[in-house]
Image (spheres, rainbow, N blue to C red):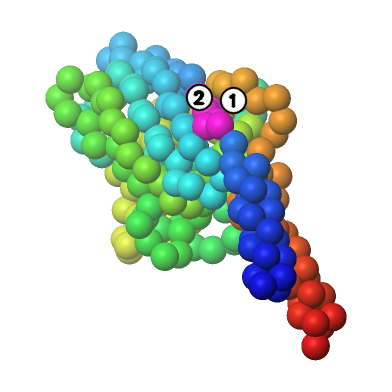
């Protein structure tokens, strides 16, 4: 009887501790703009990133105008540096040092967000989710940059020498730094996700083991 009570109390404490690791949604936004093109068009708009909790997929909303009809490579680049326009944002955000790929590929850069498919109006407003990027932890993209390219990203499947590096997506026609867009009193998920739950489960295991050893 006492053994069941102790284990139940330990389990309750673990669940409560795990619940405390949950955080309110965090949101980030990038104001995207680019140079005026020869035809007078200019890429501009916003990209909003929302993550509802630690370790969950990120919801990406892209609201842009001034694009040419067709597909345009879309990536997170490693640096939030616009001192030399989009050029100074560096390469794709790729902390794992792997080949370029598509957003659904098993092997891809963290920053590989695929293509934006734009109709004849030059305007796009889409929302989708990505399972690799994060707003916190060791894949956090806040402070980095989003970049829109002039050409279609071949997702690493082409014959061009740059296919496995950049997707051969051409020049950079729009970019913006990703900044926090929500009130955050205490930065969540510093360890990138489920560390709090793992710690709680470890505590539970120790408590149960100690009790069982004393009851033998």
CB under 8 Å between callouts 2 and 1? yes
* Residue 13 screen position, x and y as percent: 69, 54
In what quadrant of the picture does the N terminus appear? bottom right
Q: Residue at x 63, y 32 (%)?
A: 143
* Residue 9 screen position, x and y as percent: 68, 59
Disc on res. 30: 2
Magenta stretch encompasses residue 13:
no
**Local crowd size for mark 1, using a 10 Å CA cut-off: few (<14), some (14–19), many (≥20):** many
Query: In the structure shown, which secondary structural element does the residue marked by tag 2 occupy?
Result: strand
The answer to whether residue 132 is above or below residue 10 is above
Disc on res. 196: none
The CA distance from mark 2 to mark 1 is 6 Å
**Mark 2 vs mark 1: which is more N-terminal?**
2
Specify the farthest residue to the top: 40
Q: Residue at x 64, y 63 (%)?
A: 8
Specify start and end residues of the magenta stretch as a single range: 24-29
């Amino acid at each position: 009887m006492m053994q069941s009570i102790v284990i139940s109390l330990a389990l309750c404490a673990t669940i409560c501790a795990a619940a405390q690791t949950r955080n309110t949604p965090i949101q980030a936004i990038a104001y995207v703009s680019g140079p005026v093109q020869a035809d007078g068009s200019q890429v501009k708009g916003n990209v909003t990133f929302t993550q509802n909790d630690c370790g969950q997929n990120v919801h990406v909303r892209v609201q842009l105008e001034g694009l040419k009809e067709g597909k345009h490579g879309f990536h997170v680049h490693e640096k939030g540096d616009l001192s030399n326009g989009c050029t100074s944002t560096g390469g794709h955000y790729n902390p794992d040092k792997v080949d370029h790929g598509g957003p659904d590929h098993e092997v891809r850069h963290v920053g590989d967000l695929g293509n934006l498919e734009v109709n004849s109006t030059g305007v796009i407003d889409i929302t989708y989710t990505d399972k690799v990027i994060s707003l916190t932890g060791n894949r956090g993209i806040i402070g980095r940059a989003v970049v829109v390219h002039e050409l279609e990203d071949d997702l690493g499947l082409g014959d061009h020498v740059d296919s496995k590096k950049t997707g051969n997506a051409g020049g950079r026609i729009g970019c913006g730094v990703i900044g926090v867009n929500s009130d955050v009193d205490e930065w969540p998920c510093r360890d990138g996700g489920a560390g709090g739950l793992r710690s709680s489960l470890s505590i539970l295991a120790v408590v149960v083991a100690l009790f069982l050893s004393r009851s033998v």
